[in-house]
Image (spheres, rainbow, N blue to C red):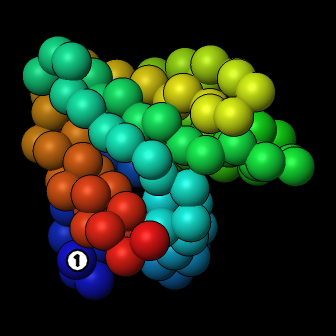
């Protein structure tokens, strides 16, 4: 999904920076995604393979994403070998979470 049309207008990240941020997420997903699930319609659960500095990178990316897309709620769960990342949205942004889940799955398949 190279098209950024799914990025909602409520995202305050400057348009020219959006492809770079999407690429950062893609790198994280393609290199670290172990599993994903959708325990609830408004929540996406990702399990990322840990390693040196991975938790810090995830937290940094989540913090920056929260700054421009306040409709996301991120919860990280550190672990010795896996890092859990829950991403939740309000009902208005369910389609954004759907698109993110699709993108995550596609990036994870390239692993």
In this rendering, position of residue 85 left or right of residue 62: left
In this rendering, position of residue 1 left or right of residue 34: left
The residue under the point 32% across, 39% down is: 36
Percent across and percent down for residue 95 are 12, 42
Q: How many marks?
A: 1
Instruction: Residue under label 1, please give it.
Output: 1
Residue 109: name its quadrant.
Answer: bottom left
In this rendering, position of residue 42 left or right of residue 13: left
The residue under the point 48% across, 36% down is: 47
- Check the image and report above or below for 92 versus 30: above
Residue occupying the far right of the picture = 52
**Element assignment for label 1:** loop
Percent across and percent down for residue 54 are 76, 47
Can see residue 96? no
Can see residue 49? yes
In this rendering, position of residue 26 left or right of residue 109: right
Q: In which quarter of the image is the C terminus?
A: bottom left
Percent across and percent down for residue 17 are 56, 74
- Check the image and report above or below for 81 versus 104: above
The residue under the point 79% across, 48% down is: 51
Residue 15: name its quadrant.
Answer: bottom left
The residue under the point 36% across, 29% down is: 45
Q: Quadrant of the N terminus?
A: bottom left
């Amino acid at each position: 999904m190279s098209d950024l049309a799914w990025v909602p207008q409520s995202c305050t990240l400057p348009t020219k920076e959006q492809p770079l941020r999407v690429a950062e997420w893609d790198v994280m997903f393609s290199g670290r995604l172990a599993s994903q699930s959708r325990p609830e319609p408004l929540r996406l659960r990702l399990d990322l393979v840990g390693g040196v500095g991975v938790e810090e990178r995830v937290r940094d990316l989540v913090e920056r994403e929260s700054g421009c897309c306040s409709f996301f709620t991120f919860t990280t769960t550190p672990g010795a070998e896996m890092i859990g990342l829950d991403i939740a949205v309000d009902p208005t942004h369910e389609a954004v979470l759907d698109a993110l889940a699709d993108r995550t799955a596609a990036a994870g398949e390239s692993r």
